Image (cartoon, rainbow, N blue to C red):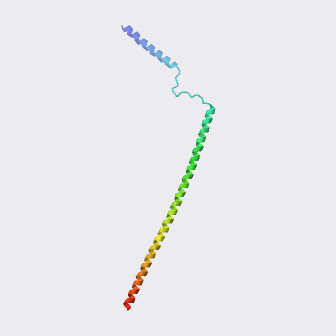
Amino acid sequence: NAVALREQIEQRQRKAIHDKQATRSEAAGYWGPEDKNSNDPDTSRAHCADLIKQMEVDQYRKHHDKGQRLRQEKQMIDNCIAEMSQDRAKEREKQRAHKEVLTTTWESQRKIKQALSTLDKV
């Protein structure tokens, strides 16, 4: 029985050594992505031309958007300046009306005092 066990152990060791040698003798496999098929050059040129057109469109849009933004800002500034001018004109009119009321009141007070002084003299 012991002889059979030794034989079995030796057989397993020989098999392990043989499997190890067989594995080492094989070339290592490639584990990366699959190789790509080469594309047609005309397809690549068409793709590049399409990308260039898209870039030109994007550049045109960017330029157009910038111009539009600048026009909107200029219009907003013009509107603000016009509104400020209107506010100043209203303020001047308000001050003129206030001055007129004060001068009228002052004039009325002066006439009343003059009338009272004339009455006191009489």
Q: Residue at x 62, y 30 (%)?
A: 40
Q: Position of residue 49 (x, y in %)?
A: 62, 38
Q: Residue at x 57, y 52 (%)?
A: 67
Give above or below for 71 relative to 93. above
Q: Can you say which quadrant of the picture contains the C terminus?
A: bottom left
Q: Residue at x 50, y 65 (%)?
A: 86
- Image quadrant where residue 54 sits: top right
Q: Residue at x 39, y 10 (%)?
A: 6
Horizontal side of residue 25 vs 116, given as left or right: right
Q: Position of residue 96 (x, y in %)?
A: 47, 73
Count of marks placed on residues: 0
- Image quadrant where residue 118 sits: bottom left
Q: Nearer the viewer, residue 15 or 85?
A: 85
In the image, farthest residue toward the left: 1
Give above or below for 71 relative to 1. below
Q: Position of residue 1 (x, y in %)?
A: 36, 7
Q: Nearer the viewer, residue 4 or 70?
A: 70
Q: Nearer the viewer, residue 13 or 59?
A: 59
Horizontal side of residue 65 vs 94, given as left or right: right
Q: Position of residue 21 (x, y in %)?
A: 49, 17
